[in-house]
């Protein structure tokens, strides 16, 4: 196989950084070949055993790139949730794919703790990969690179010490309590990381794709509108034996988000499909196309499966080797996978996260593709269109937005 010229350049830039500091951050936008580039630079180092940590749905794609490259080192690919299953020792290279997932703050998340422990045991070369290193706040950088024994913020032993210098700390009132808000990380965080970061955009790589977005409105069943109206008015819908309870603004927002797309999770923890209108609409409209469908709640997948039957799958292997359409949960499918074989993307529902919006809609992007179509399926009278307005402006949809929008629903 042949690397693209820009991948060769990135490999040549990354090599001395890895030799000097034993780590590099490849901030390469989606579809520019982060995985192959990281595997390529590893070939030029004394690596025998490489551990590639990624999302579960991206494992097969990483393994395909490894087979294509056929390097001399051994590759083990695993998802973050299963990391505790691998041998804690014996790794001389660790690749952390979608590394921004390590960046929770102010407290370190479980994923970051597990990776930090593994790296401490091995002192390996480390490559961080992400198209969006700090999607919500520069403060997300600290717990990513602090998994290293030596990193640009090593003198700050805790996030709170780091924040005193690198964060504009403000206070917010939540339920009458004042809490510190650490989300306003300063530009100096990125300045500190620049010597260790190689950034590359789709534009630099020659991508010229035009994404066309289409909004489709579906009339849901009479039952859906009856139940949502009752819930908004009384904050409870009593059934036999299950209850839909929305006794807080957050629960009301979540329940309406579910119900306007035809599913619900009851107070008991059980869930069910209430309305197949969206699934049936998608099937009829895109019946003769091979599509990628993104859904939010698990019952939405069940609704799609009921309507599509054997014409729907949920693995990349089956999707790439058949004429079936694929259904993926938004958060698990928004990163690290390619849906280049899809005729278009269709969203059964929409996530509150702006990160989910920007990352998932890029799943069809390739250097060769010039246009892609993305379809958003919204319920008439639902809250999806309001969520869409927020995330397209790179803002998460929050309770504050919902309280304002509730007056118009």
Image (cartoon, rainbow, N blue to C red):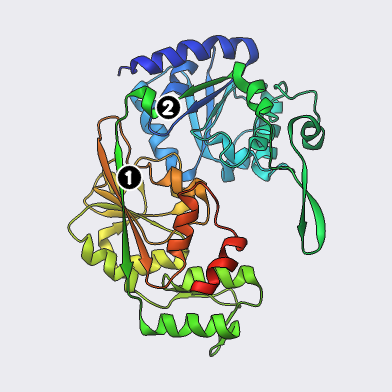
Residue in the foreground of this view, choosing between 236 and 4: 236
Going from N to C along the chain, the mark reached first, 2 or 1, is 2
Q: Position of residue 13 (x, y in %)?
A: 50, 12
Q: Position of residue 202 (x, y in %)?
A: 38, 29
Q: Nearer the viewer, mark 2 or mark 1?
A: 2
Q: Position of residue 254 (x, y in %)?
A: 55, 68
> Gap in Å between the C-alphas at discs 2 and 1?
28 Å
State if disc 1 and disc 2 touch (CB < 8 Å).
no
Tag count: 2
Q: Report the residue at 56% width, 40% height from top.
A: 135
Residue 219 in which image quadrant: bottom left
Q: Residue furthest toward the bottom? A: 240
Q: Report the residue at 47% width, 62% height from top.
A: 386
Q: Position of residue 64 (x, y in %)?
A: 36, 32
The residue that disc 2 covers is 201
The residue that disc 1 covers is 317
Q: Report the residue at 50% width, 54% height from top.
A: 390
Residue 43 seen by the camera: no
Q: Secondary structure at mark 2?
A: loop
């Amino acid at each position: 196989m042949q690397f693209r010229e820009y991948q060769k350049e990135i490999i040549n830039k990354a090599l001395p950084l890895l030799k000097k500091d034993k780590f590099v951050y490849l901030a390469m936008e989606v579809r520019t070949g982060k995985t192959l580039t990281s595997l390529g630079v590893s070939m030029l180092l004394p690596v025998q055993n490489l551990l590639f940590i990624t999302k579960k749905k991206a494992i097969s794609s990483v393994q395909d790139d490894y087979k294509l490259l056929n390097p001399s080192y051994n590759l083990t690919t695993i998802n973050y949730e299963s990391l505790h299953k691998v041998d804690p020792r014996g790794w001389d290279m660790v690749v952390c794919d979608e590394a921004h997932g390590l960046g929770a703050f102010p407290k370190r998340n479980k994923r970051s703790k597990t990776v930090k422990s593994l790296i401490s045991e091995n002192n390996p070369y480390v490559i961080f990969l992400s198209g969006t290193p700090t999607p919500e706040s520069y403060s997300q950088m600290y717990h990513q690179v602090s998994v290293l024994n030596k990193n640009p913020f090593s003198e700050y032993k805790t996030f709170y010490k780091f924040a005193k210098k690198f964060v504009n700390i403000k206070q917010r009132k939540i339920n009458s309590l004042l809490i510190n808000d650490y989300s306003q990380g300063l530009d100096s965080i990125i300045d500190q990381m620049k010597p260790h970061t190689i950034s590359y955009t789709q534009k630099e790589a020659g991508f010229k794709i035009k994404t066309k977005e289409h909004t489709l409105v579906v009339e849901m069943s009479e039952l859906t509108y009856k139940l949502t109206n009752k819930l908004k008015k009384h904050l409870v819908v009593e059934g036999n034996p299950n209850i839909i309870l929305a006794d807080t603004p957050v629960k009301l927002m979540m329940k309406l988000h579910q119900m306007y797309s035809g599913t619900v999770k009851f107070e008991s923890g059980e869930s069910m499909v209430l309305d197949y209108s969206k699934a049936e609409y998608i099937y009829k409209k895109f019946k003769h196309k091979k599509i990628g469908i993104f859904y939010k709640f698990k019952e939405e997948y069940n609704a799609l499966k009921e309507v599509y039957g054997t014409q729907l799958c949920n693995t990349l292997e089956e999707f790439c080797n058949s004429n079936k359409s694929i259904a993926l949960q938004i958060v698990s499918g928004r990163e690290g996978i390619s849906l280049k074989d899809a005729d278009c993307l269709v969203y059964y529902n929409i996530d509150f996260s702006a990160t989910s919006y920007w990352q998932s809609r890029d799943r069809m992007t390739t250097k060769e593709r010039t246009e892609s179509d993305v379809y958003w399926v919204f319920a008439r009278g639902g809250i999806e269109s309001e969520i869409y307005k927020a995330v397209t402006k790179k803002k998460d949809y929050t309770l504050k937005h919902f309280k304002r929008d509730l007056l118009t629903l």
